[in-house]
Image (cartoon, rainbow, N blue to C red):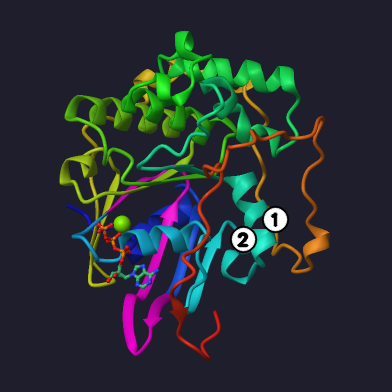
Amino acid sequence: MPEGGGTLETAARAKTGPKPMISVRHLRKVYRIGDEKVVALADINLEILKGQVVCIVGTSGSGKSTLLNQLAGLEKPTRGSVYIGKTNISRLSENQLAIFRQRFLGFVFQSYNLLPTMTALENVSLPMIFKGVSKSKRNKASMAMLAAVGLKKRAHHKPTQMSGGQQQRVGIARAFVSRPKVVFADEPTGNLDTRTTIDVMRMMVRFARRYQQTLIIVTHDPEIADYADRVITLIDGAITSDVTHTPIYDGTADADSLPPESALPEEPKLPEGPIPTEEEELPLPPDDEPLILPDDGDAPCAPPPAPAAAEEEKGELPI
Ligand SMILES: Nc1ncnc2c1ncn2[C@@H]1O[C@H](COP(=O)(O)OP(=O)(O)OP(=O)(O)O)[C@@H](O)[C@H]1O
Ligand SMILES: [Mg+2]
């Protein structure tokens, strides 16, 4: 099997292939708790292409979630940089990162993270509210996505009225609906049985193919990796293998059954150059109506904040 990310692949791509979506340079993440120092990521160099379906695998504690959080801008690196398109996300302020994630990234969580007081339709609509999509367009797009994941009849059900597999399908519809450039999923099938795991994997791959999105999945399950174009293995915070292969399910043939692009919000365009570092120069998009969250809706609707307990290695700035 050919090794991915090497010079040959880079040379071939220069002529015809897809562009890099994520570039990682000398990424290091160290957690320090008291006197103890944990090197969660040693010196990661990586390039992930547009439209690639990538699995990050490794044993517990190998650094998979840490790497995913770094790629998605959920945590700051101790050293090194992560580019998404032409933006060095390691350089963005927390506010800018929040906006960048809302506009360009999607997330699928192991525990679904749906808002409990909202219906499936409202949960799927949520990312579009932050993007200023009109209510009628939101409803149309959300219904189309719920139909695509086989949940049209459950559109007005709340999460507690659905099975785990159904909730995760709502989670997938929510992650993909606003056409993010990259969708990140940390153990998306961790709470699901084998049959539902297959359904969920096929669904995510189908969406990624249909809308040419990059999909990055963290898992400790080798069978999940069979769905990827590329499998990156971590051991003790270092990449020990990076392999491209033919996935067991391509998804392209079934992708035509998914909603046409016209049913969804316009695809967001990544910034052409580095984005301004002044927070006020990157305002939130306008909205057509105020967002009203439920009173007791304290479940996260956006990626969780970075863990507060860890203290980062001092004196090393991202480069
Ligand atoms: N917030 C934190 N504070 C301190 N150490 C951390 C923190 N997050 C992760 N670590 C440590 O970094 C290392 C990598 O953790 P990470 O969560 O990335 O592993 P993982 O591969 O995702 O494991 P799992 O399969 O169990 O989810 C571990 O040694 C872990 O203890
Ligand atoms: Mg993890």
Secondary structure, magenta segment, majority class: strand
Query: At 62% from the left edge and 71% from the top edge, which residue is drawn?
Result: 91
How packed mark 1 is, by other alpha carbons closer than 10 Å (few <14, some 14-19, many 20 or more), is few
Three-letter amino acid code of the residue under disc 2: Lys
Establish whether ligand 1 lies closer than 8 Å to the Cβ of label 1: no
Q: Is residue 103 left or right of residue 143?
A: right
- Find residue 259 and report its horizontal and vertical position in percent: 53, 18
Assess whether residue 187 is covered by the magenta stretch: no
CB under 8 Å between discs 2 and 1: yes
Three-letter amino acid code of the residue under disc 1: Glu
- Find residue 99 and report its horizontal and vertical position in percent: 67, 52
The span picked out in magenta is 27-56
State the CA–CA distance, disc 2 to disc 1.
7 Å
Judging by the rendered image, the residue that carries numbered circle 1 is: 272
- Find residue 146 and report its horizontal and vertical position in percent: 49, 18
Establish whether ligand 1 lies closer than 8 Å to the Cβ of label 2: no
Between 66 and 10, the residue placed more toward the observer is 66
Q: Is residue 276 left or right of residue 138?
A: right
Q: Is mark 2 on a helix, strand or loop?
A: loop
Q: Earlier in the sequence, mark 2 or mark 1?
A: 2
Q: Is mark 1 on a helix, strand or loop?
A: loop
- Quadrant observed for ligand 2 in the rendered image: bottom left
Q: Is residue 160 left or right of residue 4?
A: right
How packed mark 2 is, by other alpha carbons closer than 10 Å (few <14, some 14-19, many 20 or more), is some
Question: Disc number at residue 193?
Answer: none
The reply to whether residue 11 is visible in this rendering is no
Query: In the rendered image, which quarter is residue 278 located in?
Result: bottom right
Judging by the rendered image, the residue that carries numbered circle 2 is: 86
In the image, is residue 245 above or below residue 290?
A: below
